[in-house]
Amino acid sequence: MQTLLPMNSGNPSFANDDWDPTKVSLVCGLKSCPLQVGVLIFPVRSGGLVDVYRCTAFLIDNDKIMSNGHCDNPGAREGYFITRTDIPQRAIRHVTQRLFKAFTPALDKNGKVDPEDTSGRPDVLVFQLDVPIATIPPLHLAHGPAKTYQTLTGYVANLIPGKSFTTMAIGQVTCAVHRNELQFPYNLSESPDMLTVYKCNAEKGNSGSPMFAEGSADVEAILQGSADVDGTAAAIRHDEKREPHDYEIQHNIIATNLRCLDYPSASGNHCVSVTDDESVTRFNALINSMRASLAARPAPGTFPTEFKVLSMELKTQLVQPETEFEDFYYPTCSTHSLGSSLAFPSELVKMEFDEWGEPSIKTLKEESSTGSVTHQFSNGVSVKMNWQPPFGPYDIPSNDPRTQLGNSFSIALPGCSS
């Protein structure tokens, strides 16, 4: 559906003697910051050099932290959790045993696993610390039935511009929680196992950040990736030879819904699995439902007959799924005397989509073809038509009712029952 970027961060190598976890600086860059948010760092030593990899992490027990599964570095001999360095409770702890890990690595175009990439599936890691941190109360993970909220705010560890890789500040990202019919066609009440939240983006090193709903101290979700808007747009232009729709390239963050996490025990919620296949199925069902609704639209005006609607797709230059249709209204019964003419209304309608992928029907033009009544019989009439041309070529030309009916024909028009 969309290209995702993991938010873990690597760095050019340090000389072996220059790396020291006590030199890491993490301060609050806001008016206030959660004490429990820190950084997870893995130094990987090789040939006198040290490559340092980092994510955000947070305390969930006095001796346990949580971050993303894609932040794990199983080959590293050492790892550290470092809390803020501008508080008296500053702590540096070794991470030891992996207590819980939920992670499905992404596959590249060749089907090969990228062990550091994020696939859009639940992505969580819980580590044991070597020594408890008794001076900081842990954060509480959200559990129980789904909760409705309008925003999610993540507290993230960011590099300070112009400073070294080991100098960071805690910032925040606040995202709008909104259904997107293409990318995230789910309601919070369904307890989706993954969340896509909008009007925000993250940077390298933000993976593993706790995300809070407004007015709550519970961690609702854990940030794991950000939309690669440029990459998604480029892929659409290359693969589909078109410009992307607005709702396809919104800045967003993906996160794991902690109410669906089986840690430390089963959540008890019936959670919906958010997958590309399920999202596409829901989007297609919505389009089909909108198309079906075209056949129930009332005629544009007041007429002495009732109608059935024949809705035909037109060939247009619009980018799918935007589509134009002709709604052709065929008389089915008479409500009162017809007089000397019979009307066949038609409309040019367009199915378009807003920034959230929500479809709507817009009437672009209205026409009415008139048939002169040449003969009346007990339950119908014969007419000679003066057809207005169709609004454009039909996707299936043989569906044009003008061609099917011809210029002279008879039509049954019994009295309407209601």
Image (cartoon, helix red, strand yellow):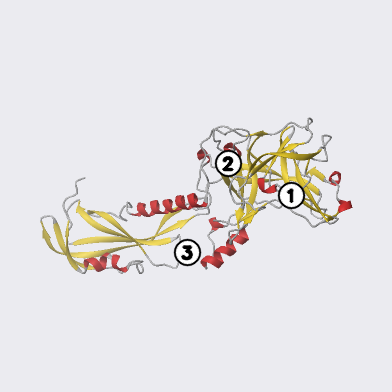
Q: Is residue 361 left or right of residue 184?
A: left
| Neighbours of disc 3 within 10 Å: few (<14), some (14-19), many (20+) | few
Badge 3 or badge 2: first in the primary sequence = 2
Query: Dividing the image into 4 quarters, which one contains the C terminus?
Result: top left
The amino acid at mark 1 is Gly
| Neighbours of disc 1 within 10 Å: few (<14), some (14-19), many (20+) | few
Query: Dividing the image into 4 quarters, which one contains the N terminus?
Result: bottom right
Tell which residue pokes out farthest to the left in this image: 378
Q: Identify the residue at image location x=49%, y=52%.
A: 277
Question: Which element is circle 2 on?
Answer: loop
Q: Which residue is mark 3?
A: 319
Q: Identify the residue at image location x=60%, y=43%.
A: 256
List x then y, in percent, for residue 334: 19, 53
Viewer-closest of 105 and 354: 105
List x then y, in percent, for residue 378: 10, 55
Q: Which residue is mark 2?
A: 150
Badge 1 or badge 2: first in the primary sequence = 1
Q: Which residue is mark 1?
A: 75
Q: Are marks 3 and 1 in contact (CB under 8 Å)?
A: no
* Label 3 to label 2: alpha-carbon separation: 31 Å
Question: Which element is circle 3 on?
Answer: loop
- The answer, for residue 108, to whether it is visible in the render is yes
Question: Which element is circle 1 on?
Answer: loop
Q: Is residue 217 left or right of residue 182?
A: right
